[in-house]
Image: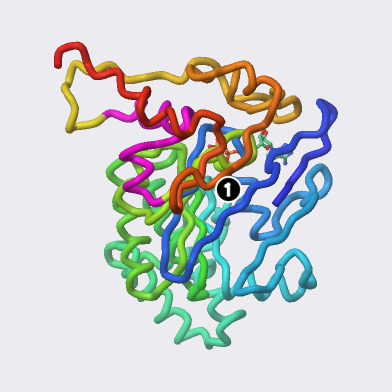
Amino acid sequence: MRTHFYTRAGDLRAVDGLSYYVNRGESVGLVGESACGKSVSALSVMRLIPNPPGMIAGGEILFNGQDILRVSEEEMQHIRGNKIAMVFQEPTTSLNPVLTVRRQLTESLELHRGMDSASSAHEAIKLLQLVGIPDPGRRLKDYPYQFSGGMQQRIMIAMALSCNPALLIADEPTTSVDVTVQAQLLEIIDDLRSRFGTAVIIITHNLGVVARYVDRVNVMYAGRLAESGVTDVIFDHPMHPYTLGLLQSVPRLDLPRDRELGVIEGLPPNLACVPSGCAFHPRCKFVIDRCRKERPPFEEAEENHFSACFRSQEIDEIKRPEPESE
Ligand SMILES: Nc1ncnc2c1ncn2[C@@H]1O[C@H](COP(=O)(O)OP(=O)(O)OP(=O)(O)O)[C@@H](O)[C@H]1O
Ligand SMILES: [Mg+2]
Protein backbone atom coordinates (compact mmCIF):
# COMPACT_ATOMS: atom_id res chain seq x y z
CA MET A 1 0.00 0.00 0.00
CA ARG A 2 1.08 3.55 -0.70
CA THR A 3 -0.41 6.67 0.85
CA HIS A 4 0.96 10.07 -0.04
CA PHE A 5 0.29 13.59 1.11
CA TYR A 6 0.74 16.38 -1.38
CA THR A 7 1.96 19.28 0.70
CA ARG A 8 3.78 22.54 0.06
CA ALA A 9 6.90 20.98 1.47
CA GLY A 10 6.73 18.36 -1.26
CA ASP A 11 5.17 14.96 -1.78
CA LEU A 12 5.27 13.16 1.49
CA ARG A 13 5.28 9.39 1.21
CA ALA A 14 3.79 8.51 4.56
CA VAL A 15 3.20 4.91 3.55
CA ASP A 16 5.52 3.79 0.82
CA GLY A 17 4.98 0.19 -0.13
CA LEU A 18 3.88 -1.34 3.16
CA SER A 19 2.72 -4.93 3.06
CA TYR A 20 1.67 -7.23 5.87
CA TYR A 21 -1.18 -9.53 6.85
CA VAL A 22 -3.18 -10.54 9.87
CA ASN A 23 -5.11 -13.77 10.24
CA ARG A 24 -8.43 -14.33 11.96
CA GLY A 25 -7.99 -14.51 15.71
CA GLU A 26 -4.41 -13.38 15.47
CA SER A 27 -2.81 -10.22 16.77
CA VAL A 28 0.06 -8.46 15.10
CA GLY A 29 2.04 -5.41 16.16
CA LEU A 30 2.97 -2.50 13.94
CA VAL A 31 5.93 -0.87 15.59
CA GLY A 32 8.12 2.10 14.78
CA GLU A 33 9.17 5.56 15.89
CA SER A 34 6.97 8.59 15.67
CA ALA A 35 5.94 9.72 12.18
CA CYS A 36 6.95 6.54 10.36
CA GLY A 37 3.44 6.16 8.94
CA LYS A 38 1.74 3.81 11.41
CA SER A 39 -1.45 5.79 11.94
CA VAL A 40 -1.65 6.79 8.29
CA SER A 41 -1.45 3.13 7.27
CA ALA A 42 -4.28 2.28 9.68
CA LEU A 43 -6.39 5.19 8.51
CA SER A 44 -5.79 3.97 4.97
CA VAL A 45 -7.28 0.60 5.90
CA MET A 46 -10.33 2.48 7.18
CA ARG A 47 -10.26 4.66 4.07
CA LEU A 48 -10.24 7.73 6.26
CA ILE A 49 -7.36 9.60 4.66
CA PRO A 50 -8.28 13.27 4.23
CA ASN A 51 -8.25 14.17 0.55
CA PRO A 52 -6.75 16.65 -0.13
CA PRO A 53 -3.94 16.64 0.90
CA GLY A 54 -3.78 12.86 1.15
CA MET A 55 -4.37 10.09 -1.30
CA ILE A 56 -4.05 6.34 -1.34
CA ALA A 57 -1.69 6.24 -4.26
CA GLY A 58 -1.66 2.55 -4.94
CA GLY A 59 -1.77 -0.99 -3.72
CA GLU A 60 -4.45 -3.26 -2.37
CA ILE A 61 -6.09 -3.75 0.99
CA LEU A 62 -7.55 -7.22 0.94
CA PHE A 63 -10.17 -7.96 3.55
CA ASN A 64 -11.48 -11.51 3.33
CA GLY A 65 -10.09 -11.53 -0.19
CA GLN A 66 -11.92 -8.39 -1.27
CA ASP A 67 -9.96 -5.26 -2.19
CA ILE A 68 -11.63 -2.60 -0.07
CA LEU A 69 -9.97 0.15 -2.03
CA ARG A 70 -12.36 -0.75 -4.83
CA VAL A 71 -15.68 -0.91 -3.01
CA SER A 72 -18.14 1.99 -3.09
CA GLU A 73 -18.16 4.56 -0.28
CA GLU A 74 -21.53 3.21 0.81
CA GLU A 75 -20.21 -0.31 1.09
CA MET A 76 -17.17 1.04 2.90
CA GLN A 77 -19.40 2.65 5.49
CA HIS A 78 -20.97 -0.70 6.10
CA ILE A 79 -17.53 -2.32 6.47
CA ARG A 80 -16.43 0.41 8.88
CA GLY A 81 -19.51 0.01 11.01
CA ASN A 82 -19.67 -3.75 11.03
CA LYS A 83 -16.42 -5.41 10.13
CA ILE A 84 -13.38 -3.27 10.75
CA ALA A 85 -13.14 -1.03 13.78
CA MET A 86 -10.41 1.27 14.95
CA VAL A 87 -9.52 2.67 18.33
CA PHE A 88 -7.93 6.01 17.58
CA GLN A 89 -4.79 7.38 19.11
CA GLU A 90 -6.54 10.39 20.63
CA PRO A 91 -9.75 9.49 22.46
CA THR A 92 -10.49 13.12 23.09
CA THR A 93 -10.69 13.84 19.39
CA SER A 94 -12.85 10.83 18.61
CA LEU A 95 -15.38 10.97 21.42
CA ASN A 96 -17.98 13.65 20.99
CA PRO A 97 -17.76 15.95 24.03
CA VAL A 98 -21.38 17.08 23.91
CA LEU A 99 -22.99 13.66 23.70
CA THR A 100 -23.47 11.25 26.57
CA VAL A 101 -21.65 7.95 26.48
CA ARG A 102 -25.00 6.24 26.10
CA ARG A 103 -25.79 8.17 22.96
CA GLN A 104 -22.39 7.46 21.44
CA LEU A 105 -22.52 3.77 22.22
CA THR A 106 -26.12 3.14 21.24
CA GLU A 107 -25.97 5.00 17.96
CA SER A 108 -24.10 2.33 16.07
CA LEU A 109 -26.05 -0.44 17.78
CA GLU A 110 -29.28 1.08 16.55
CA LEU A 111 -27.91 2.01 13.15
CA HIS A 112 -25.92 -1.09 12.32
CA ARG A 113 -27.54 -3.76 14.40
CA GLY A 114 -31.10 -2.51 14.22
CA MET A 115 -31.70 -2.50 17.99
CA ASP A 116 -34.38 -0.45 19.67
CA SER A 117 -33.59 2.04 22.41
CA ALA A 118 -34.06 -0.33 25.35
CA SER A 119 -32.04 -3.20 23.98
CA SER A 120 -29.26 -0.91 22.74
CA ALA A 121 -28.95 0.60 26.23
CA HIS A 122 -28.81 -2.89 27.67
CA GLU A 123 -26.10 -3.85 25.18
CA ALA A 124 -24.19 -0.63 25.93
CA ILE A 125 -24.08 -1.55 29.60
CA LYS A 126 -22.75 -4.99 28.70
CA LEU A 127 -20.04 -3.45 26.55
CA LEU A 128 -18.94 -1.03 29.26
CA GLN A 129 -18.81 -3.92 31.67
CA LEU A 130 -16.70 -5.89 29.24
CA VAL A 131 -14.07 -3.14 29.09
CA GLY A 132 -14.02 -2.73 32.84
CA ILE A 133 -15.96 0.47 33.50
CA PRO A 134 -17.29 0.24 37.08
CA ASP A 135 -20.98 0.83 37.65
CA PRO A 136 -21.77 1.02 33.92
CA GLY A 137 -25.53 1.42 34.32
CA ARG A 138 -25.13 4.68 36.17
CA ARG A 139 -22.30 5.96 34.03
CA LEU A 140 -24.18 5.73 30.75
CA LYS A 141 -25.62 9.19 31.24
CA ASP A 142 -22.21 10.77 31.76
CA TYR A 143 -20.27 12.83 29.23
CA PRO A 144 -16.73 12.01 28.08
CA TYR A 145 -15.11 14.72 30.22
CA GLN A 146 -16.39 12.92 33.31
CA PHE A 147 -14.06 10.02 32.55
CA SER A 148 -10.28 9.84 32.85
CA GLY A 149 -8.12 9.39 29.76
CA GLY A 150 -7.78 5.67 30.35
CA MET A 151 -11.53 5.32 30.85
CA GLN A 152 -12.14 7.24 27.64
CA GLN A 153 -9.87 4.81 25.85
CA ARG A 154 -11.94 1.96 27.26
CA ILE A 155 -15.09 3.61 26.01
CA MET A 156 -13.45 3.84 22.59
CA ILE A 157 -12.76 0.12 22.73
CA ALA A 158 -16.38 -0.51 23.75
CA MET A 159 -17.54 1.58 20.80
CA ALA A 160 -15.24 -0.31 18.47
CA LEU A 161 -16.61 -3.59 19.76
CA SER A 162 -20.24 -2.58 19.50
CA CYS A 163 -20.22 -3.73 15.90
CA ASN A 164 -18.56 -7.04 16.71
CA PRO A 165 -15.74 -6.43 14.22
CA ALA A 166 -13.72 -9.10 12.47
CA LEU A 167 -10.72 -6.79 12.60
CA LEU A 168 -9.83 -4.36 15.36
CA ILE A 169 -7.07 -1.81 14.86
CA ALA A 170 -5.86 -0.25 18.10
CA ASP A 171 -3.67 2.80 17.70
CA GLU A 172 -1.66 3.30 20.85
CA PRO A 173 -2.86 6.09 23.07
CA THR A 174 0.23 8.22 23.57
CA THR A 175 -0.70 11.02 25.86
CA SER A 176 -3.75 10.02 27.77
CA VAL A 177 -2.83 6.88 29.67
CA ASP A 178 -0.01 5.61 31.84
CA VAL A 179 1.70 2.26 31.39
CA THR A 180 -0.45 0.41 33.88
CA VAL A 181 -3.62 1.46 32.15
CA GLN A 182 -2.02 0.72 28.82
CA ALA A 183 -1.31 -2.84 29.94
CA GLN A 184 -4.90 -3.18 31.15
CA LEU A 185 -6.21 -2.01 27.79
CA LEU A 186 -4.03 -4.48 25.96
CA GLU A 187 -5.22 -7.18 28.33
CA ILE A 188 -8.84 -6.35 27.50
CA ILE A 189 -8.16 -6.41 23.78
CA ASP A 190 -6.31 -9.69 24.08
CA ASP A 191 -9.16 -11.21 26.03
CA LEU A 192 -11.63 -10.15 23.34
CA ARG A 193 -9.41 -11.58 20.66
CA SER A 194 -9.35 -14.98 22.29
CA ARG A 195 -13.06 -14.93 23.10
CA PHE A 196 -14.41 -13.71 19.79
CA GLY A 197 -11.65 -14.61 17.34
CA THR A 198 -11.17 -10.98 16.38
CA ALA A 199 -8.09 -10.21 14.33
CA VAL A 200 -6.13 -7.44 16.03
CA ILE A 201 -3.54 -4.93 14.84
CA ILE A 202 -1.78 -3.11 17.68
CA ILE A 203 0.09 0.04 16.78
CA THR A 204 2.81 1.29 19.09
CA HIS A 205 6.24 2.87 19.14
CA ASN A 206 7.36 0.72 22.02
CA LEU A 207 8.45 -2.82 21.22
CA GLY A 208 8.34 -3.69 24.91
CA VAL A 209 4.63 -2.96 25.03
CA VAL A 210 3.64 -5.52 22.45
CA ALA A 211 5.91 -8.35 23.52
CA ARG A 212 3.21 -10.14 25.47
CA TYR A 213 0.28 -9.34 23.31
CA VAL A 214 1.13 -10.00 19.70
CA ASP A 215 1.90 -13.17 17.78
CA ARG A 216 3.94 -11.39 15.16
CA VAL A 217 5.73 -8.08 14.96
CA ASN A 218 6.03 -5.80 11.95
CA VAL A 219 8.71 -3.17 12.40
CA MET A 220 8.16 -0.10 10.28
CA TYR A 221 10.64 2.56 9.24
CA ALA A 222 9.98 5.52 6.93
CA GLY A 223 6.75 4.20 5.48
CA ARG A 224 7.76 0.60 4.86
CA LEU A 225 8.68 -2.55 6.70
CA ALA A 226 12.19 -3.04 8.02
CA GLU A 227 11.57 -6.40 9.64
CA SER A 228 8.79 -8.84 10.29
CA GLY A 229 8.56 -12.11 12.15
CA VAL A 230 7.19 -14.11 15.06
CA THR A 231 7.43 -12.07 18.26
CA ASP A 232 9.77 -14.39 20.17
CA VAL A 233 12.11 -14.65 17.20
CA ILE A 234 12.24 -10.88 16.73
CA PHE A 235 13.12 -10.43 20.40
CA ASP A 236 15.58 -13.28 20.44
CA HIS A 237 17.51 -12.41 17.32
CA PRO A 238 16.51 -9.36 15.37
CA MET A 239 18.03 -9.24 11.89
CA HIS A 240 17.58 -5.57 11.12
CA PRO A 241 19.77 -2.94 12.83
CA TYR A 242 16.74 -0.73 13.39
CA THR A 243 14.90 -3.44 15.33
CA LEU A 244 18.07 -4.10 17.27
CA GLY A 245 18.23 -0.40 18.16
CA LEU A 246 14.61 -0.39 19.28
CA LEU A 247 15.20 -3.45 21.44
CA GLN A 248 18.31 -2.03 23.04
CA SER A 249 16.36 1.06 24.04
CA VAL A 250 13.81 -0.98 26.02
CA PRO A 251 14.62 -1.48 29.73
CA ARG A 252 14.93 -5.18 30.61
CA LEU A 253 14.51 -6.75 33.99
CA ASP A 254 16.49 -9.83 33.04
CA LEU A 255 19.71 -7.94 32.31
CA PRO A 256 22.13 -6.32 34.77
CA ARG A 257 20.78 -3.11 36.22
CA ASP A 258 23.83 -1.10 35.27
CA ARG A 259 23.39 -1.97 31.61
CA GLU A 260 23.18 1.23 29.63
CA LEU A 261 20.13 1.69 27.48
CA GLY A 262 20.93 2.12 23.84
CA VAL A 263 19.83 5.05 21.77
CA ILE A 264 19.37 5.21 18.05
CA GLU A 265 21.35 8.27 17.04
CA GLY A 266 19.64 10.88 14.90
CA LEU A 267 16.04 11.26 13.93
CA PRO A 268 13.71 9.47 11.55
CA PRO A 269 13.83 11.09 8.11
CA ASN A 270 11.43 13.66 6.78
CA LEU A 271 9.17 11.53 4.64
CA ALA A 272 9.22 14.16 1.89
CA CYS A 273 12.91 13.48 1.30
CA VAL A 274 13.87 10.01 2.41
CA PRO A 275 17.62 9.19 2.20
CA SER A 276 18.93 7.31 -0.81
CA GLY A 277 19.42 3.57 -0.66
CA CYS A 278 18.32 2.20 2.69
CA ALA A 279 16.30 4.92 4.45
CA PHE A 280 17.89 3.93 7.76
CA HIS A 281 21.51 4.17 6.58
CA PRO A 282 22.38 7.60 8.06
CA ARG A 283 21.59 6.28 11.54
CA CYS A 284 22.83 2.75 11.15
CA LYS A 285 25.83 1.41 13.06
CA PHE A 286 26.31 -1.32 10.50
CA VAL A 287 26.23 0.84 7.39
CA ILE A 288 28.35 -0.15 4.40
CA ASP A 289 28.80 1.68 1.14
CA ARG A 290 26.19 -0.35 -0.67
CA CYS A 291 23.47 0.81 1.78
CA ARG A 292 23.87 4.40 0.59
CA LYS A 293 23.23 3.52 -3.02
CA GLU A 294 20.90 0.57 -3.14
CA ARG A 295 17.68 -0.06 -1.32
CA PRO A 296 17.85 -3.47 0.33
CA PRO A 297 14.92 -5.72 -0.65
CA PHE A 298 12.55 -6.98 2.03
CA GLU A 299 13.50 -10.64 1.95
CA GLU A 300 12.91 -13.84 3.84
CA ALA A 301 16.20 -14.06 5.70
CA GLU A 302 15.19 -17.27 7.45
CA GLU A 303 11.91 -19.14 7.53
CA ASN A 304 9.04 -16.74 8.27
CA HIS A 305 11.47 -14.00 9.23
CA PHE A 306 11.80 -11.08 6.84
CA SER A 307 14.29 -8.26 6.90
CA ALA A 308 15.26 -5.40 4.62
CA CYS A 309 19.00 -5.24 5.28
CA PHE A 310 22.02 -6.29 3.24
CA ARG A 311 23.67 -7.48 6.43
CA SER A 312 20.72 -9.34 7.99
CA GLN A 313 22.68 -12.56 8.24
CA GLU A 314 25.62 -10.94 10.00
CA ILE A 315 23.67 -8.81 12.48
CA ASP A 316 22.90 -11.76 14.65
CA GLU A 317 26.57 -12.61 15.16
CA ILE A 318 28.05 -9.16 15.49
CA LYS A 319 25.25 -7.52 17.40
CA ARG A 320 26.00 -8.71 20.89
CA PRO A 321 28.90 -6.85 22.40
CA GLU A 322 28.47 -8.59 25.79
CA PRO A 323 28.56 -6.32 28.83
CA GLU A 324 32.15 -5.91 29.98
CA SER A 325 31.35 -7.05 33.49
CA GLU A 326 30.76 -10.56 32.19
N1 LIG B 1 -3.34 15.11 7.14
C1 LIG B 1 -2.03 15.11 6.92
N2 LIG B 1 -1.45 16.03 6.10
C2 LIG B 1 -0.13 16.03 5.85
N3 LIG B 1 0.74 15.15 6.38
C3 LIG B 1 0.24 14.20 7.20
C4 LIG B 1 -1.17 14.14 7.52
N4 LIG B 1 -1.35 13.09 8.38
C5 LIG B 1 -0.14 12.55 8.59
N5 LIG B 1 0.82 13.20 7.88
C6 LIG B 1 2.24 12.89 7.86
O1 LIG B 1 2.42 11.51 7.59
C7 LIG B 1 3.56 11.03 8.28
C8 LIG B 1 3.20 9.78 9.04
O2 LIG B 1 2.33 10.14 10.11
P1 LIG B 1 1.66 9.09 11.10
O3 LIG B 1 0.62 9.83 11.84
O4 LIG B 1 1.25 7.89 10.33
O5 LIG B 1 2.85 8.71 12.06
P2 LIG B 1 2.87 7.62 13.22
O6 LIG B 1 3.81 6.57 12.80
O7 LIG B 1 1.48 7.22 13.54
O8 LIG B 1 3.52 8.44 14.42
P3 LIG B 1 3.14 8.49 15.99
O9 LIG B 1 3.84 7.33 16.63
O10 LIG B 1 3.70 9.79 16.44
O11 LIG B 1 1.65 8.42 16.11
C9 LIG B 1 4.06 12.17 9.16
O12 LIG B 1 5.16 12.76 8.54
C10 LIG B 1 2.88 13.11 9.21
O13 LIG B 1 3.31 14.44 9.36
MG1 LIG C 1 0.22 7.59 15.12
Instruction: Find the residue positioned furthest to the top.
Output: 324
Rendered residue at 45%/53% (across/down): 304
Name the quadrant containing residue 226: top right
Q: Position of residue 319 (x, y in %)?
A: 36, 24
Quadrant field for ligand 1 = top right
Of residues 235 and 202, which is closer to you in this image? 235
- Can residue 182 be seen at all in this image of the molecule? no
Rendered residue at 53%/69% (across/down): 103
Q: Is residue 233 magenta?
A: yes
Quadrant placement of the C terminus: top left
| Magenta-colored segment: predominant secondary structure | helix
Please state which amino acid type lies under the numbered disc 1: Thr
Q: Give the extent of the magenta segment.
A: 230-251
Name the quadrant containing residue 71: bottom right
**Residue at disc 1, secondary structure:** helix
Q: Position of residue 267 (x, y in %)?
A: 56, 20
Rendered residue at 51%/58% (across/down): 169
Q: Is residue 112 positioned above or below 225 on the image?
A: below
Of residues 185 and 133, which is closer to you in this image? 185
Q: Position of residue 248 (x, y in %)?
A: 35, 26
Q: Position of residue 143 (x, y in %)?
A: 47, 58
Rendered residue at 35%/45% (across/down): 233
Q: Is residue 98 left or right of residue 317?
A: right
Q: Residues within 10 Å of mark 1 (few under 14, many from 20)?
A: few
- Can residue 262 be seen at all in this image of the molecule? yes
> Which residue in the protein does label 1 denote?
93
Q: Is residue 194 magenta?
A: no
Q: Is residue 16 positioned above or below 42 on the image?
A: above
Question: How are the colours assigned in the image?
Answer: rainbow
Q: Is residue 56 left or right of residue 23?
A: right
